[in-house]
Image (tube, helix red, strand yellow):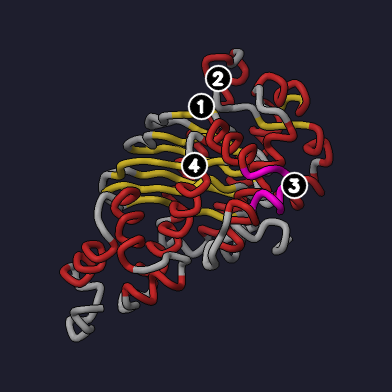
């Protein structure tokens, strides 16, 4: 699994059987580059909104109480302007474990992203899901000794409701979505290659050869499907990884940060950073220092 899905390997949140995360207390532009993974992802907006959550080419702007599900191997991305009061719960269920318990999932998709199409039974189930997801959010932030036992039970209940009320045959759902299987496969090839090689120099020629198509075709195809050039996507992945690296190791020099993440130098790093996060990497690091996240004795020209 690590080789096939190495651009995003989802590790369950110990000791739970699924990955659980709460997004909160962040401000400013937030970007997650287009990617895919084997797990089934659920996003629940509690407060605030997600400005653009794109799933297989379809754009959603979430509101409080809205649930989105990303099925296995669906390409998805996020762009949003976060506020400190925003609160979102994210869960990723490992596909292999769910399939072992429910083999029918090989031929089904979870279809919950269009509440306007629900029947009365689905509307009731949706309300139940909202309540369960809120309980998970509260428990996850608590110090209760048995919280992991309760969260595990709630995660199973959420999964049971999803599989009971919101599954549809895979082929009919894919036809309705309108994106052909070969297009999804090719996009997965591109995103996997870029996420595996963003630290190195990536040429359109190498990428096209990896996908078995011409440079011209790949460039047109990717722009049409993703509304983003391949160069733009590569810089997005590089900037996202540089951002993560700087948060984890804020004393890293900007030169090392740029070269480690595939940029030719600090100038190109700053350009990409400003385009995505609204400020250069230099300014971002300066703000980390002001906020006390970098020791004041760190070199000022780093």
Labelled pair 2, 3 in contact (Cβ < 8 Å): no
SS at circle 1: helix
- Which of 286 and 136 lies nearest the eye of the viewer? 286
Query: Which image quarter holds the C terminus?
Result: bottom left
SS at circle 2: helix
Q: Mark 1 points at which residue?
A: 127
Q: Name the residue under label 3.
A: 212
**Real-space CA distance between mark 1 and mark 2, rounded to the nearest whole angstrom:** 6 Å
**Residue 178, quarter of the rendered image:** top right
- Which of 283 and 100 lies nearest the eye of the viewer? 283
Q: Mark 4 points at which residue?
A: 229
The mark nearer the N terminus, 1 or 4, is: 1
Q: Mark 2 points at which residue?
A: 123
Q: Residue at x 30, y 52 (%)?
A: 26
Which of discs 2 and 3 lies nearer the camera? The answer is 3
Instruction: Please provide percent x and percent y for residue 2.
Output: 70, 63
Using residue 195 as the reference point, say whether residue 243 is left or right of it: left
Labelled pair 3, 1 in contact (Cβ < 8 Å): no
What span is in magenta?
A: 207-215
Q: Which residue is drawn at 81% across and 49% down?
A: 100
């Amino acid at each position: 699994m690590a080789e096939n899905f190495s651009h995003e390997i989802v590790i369950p949140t110990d000791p739970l059987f699924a990955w659980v995360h709460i997004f909160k207390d962040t401000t400013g532009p937030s970007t997650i580059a287009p990617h895919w993974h084997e797990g089934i992802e659920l996003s629940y907006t509690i407060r605030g909104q997600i400005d653009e959550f794109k799933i297989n080419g379809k754009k959603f702007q979430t509101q409080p109480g809205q649930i989105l599900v990303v099925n296995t191997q669906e390409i998805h991305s996020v762009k949003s302007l976060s506020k400190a009061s925003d609160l979102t719960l994210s869960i990723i269920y490992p596909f292999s474990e769910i399939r072992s318990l429910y083999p029918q999932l090989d031929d089904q998709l979870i279809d919950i992203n269009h509440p306007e199409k629900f029947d009365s039974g689905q509307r009731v189930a949706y309300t139940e899901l909202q309540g369960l997801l809120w309980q998970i959010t509260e428990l996850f932030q608590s110090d209760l000794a048995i919280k992991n036992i309760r969260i595990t039970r709630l995660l199973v209940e959420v999964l049971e409701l999803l599989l009971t009320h919101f599954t549809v045959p895979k082929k009919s759902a894919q036809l309705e979505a309108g994106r052909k299987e070969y297009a999804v496969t090719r996009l997965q090839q591109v995103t996997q290659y870029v996420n595996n090689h963003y630290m190195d120099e990536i040429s359109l020629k190498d990428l096209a050869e990896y996908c078995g198509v011409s440079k011209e075709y790949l460039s047109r195809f990717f722009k049409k499907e993703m509304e983003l050039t391949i160069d733009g996507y590569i810089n997005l992945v590089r900037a996202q990884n540089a951002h993560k690296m700087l948060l984890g190791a804020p004393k890293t020099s900007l030169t090392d940060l740029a070269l480690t993440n595939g940029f030719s130098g600090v100038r190109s790093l700053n350009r990409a950073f400003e385009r995505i996060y609204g400020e250069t990497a230099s300014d971002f690091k300066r703000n980390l220092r002001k906020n006390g996240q970098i020791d004041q004795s760190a070199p000022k020209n780093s």
